[in-house]
Amino acid sequence: MRVVIAEDAVLLRAGLTRLLTDADHEVLAAVGDAELLLQAIERHHPDLAIVDVRMPPTHTDEGIRAALKVRDRWPDVAILVLSQYVEERYATELVAGETAGLGYLLKDRVADVREFLDAARRVAAGGTVLDPEVVSQLLARSRQRDPLDRLSPRETEVLGLMAEGRTNVAIAEALVISGGAVEKHVTNIFTKLDLPPTEGDHRRVLAVLRFLGVG
């Protein structure tokens, strides 16, 4: 996996570089601001860009803005956004578009090296990974607008795990139920959210976006 890192905190930037390098991934560039990130992407065209939400000069939304530009200019470059806190507005904006090859994690997750590396690999491979805390806050907000009363408590759990980017197998393991039970719940979710099968739409992504209130 070929990676570009954009993180203004020197120690975290060095730590991420070391973690990825030790896991036999190639860090092509590690930069400290959004402009250098865009330059690095254009030069190296990596598999994955790991981007801090807040970067110089104002430490507000430079990182997320850069991530959105990367999605627009180089849609085949996967993005894993890191944030100190749950930034609901930025998370919503990020997941409102194409969610393949996209991740949003809190920086605390980096401490779990295995979990972080697994998330990076999944995003680089075209998957979607959302931090459970991000999912929880977005779901809480979406329920204020639309409670989605047709979903059972178990279906709500399943859809929440889907929103974290988990496969049916991973959901079955997390909930200690059979794969067949998960498939049944997923089918019920599609039905209750009025998502009939079509050739052009990915129902799993549409269900998650609708549940998060951005689709």
Image: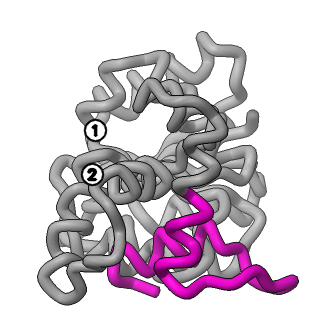
Residue 37's mark?
none
Give above or below for 147 relative to 135: below
Q: Residue 89 at x, y = what percent?
A: 24, 77
Total marks drawn?
2
- Looking at the image, is mark 1 or mark 2 earlier in the sequence? 2
For label 1, count other residues whose C-alpha is less than 10 Å away and answer few (under 14), some (14-19) or many (20+).
Answer: some
The structure residue drawn at horizontal position 23% and vertical position 86%, both measured from the top left corner, is: 146
Looking at the rendered structure, the kind of residue marked 2 is Ser
Which colouring convention does the figure follow? one colour
Extreme residue in the top direction: 22
Question: Which residue is drawn at the image coordinates 55% and 82% (left, top)?
Answer: 97
Q: Residues within 10 Å of mark 2 (few under 14, many from 20)?
A: some
Q: Residue at x 51, y 61 (%)?
A: 36
- Say whether residue 66 is visible: no
Mark 1 in CB contact with mark 2 (< 8 angstroms): yes
- In this figure, which residue is indicated by the disc labeled 1? 107
Give percent across and percent down for residue 162: 49, 53
Give the vertical position of 205 relative to 23 (above or below): below
Q: 105 left or right of 80?
A: left
- Tell me what residue is drawn at x 61 percent, y 18 percent: 21
Q: Say what secondary structure mark 1 lies in.
A: helix
Mark 2, secondary structure of its residue: strand
Q: Is residue 53 visible?
A: yes
- Quarter occupied by residue 156: bottom left
Q: Position of residue 42 (x, y in %)?
A: 72, 65
Q: Does the stretch in magenta take in 99?
A: no
Q: Which residue carries the number 2 mark? A: 83
Hey, what amino acid is under mark 1?
Answer: Lys
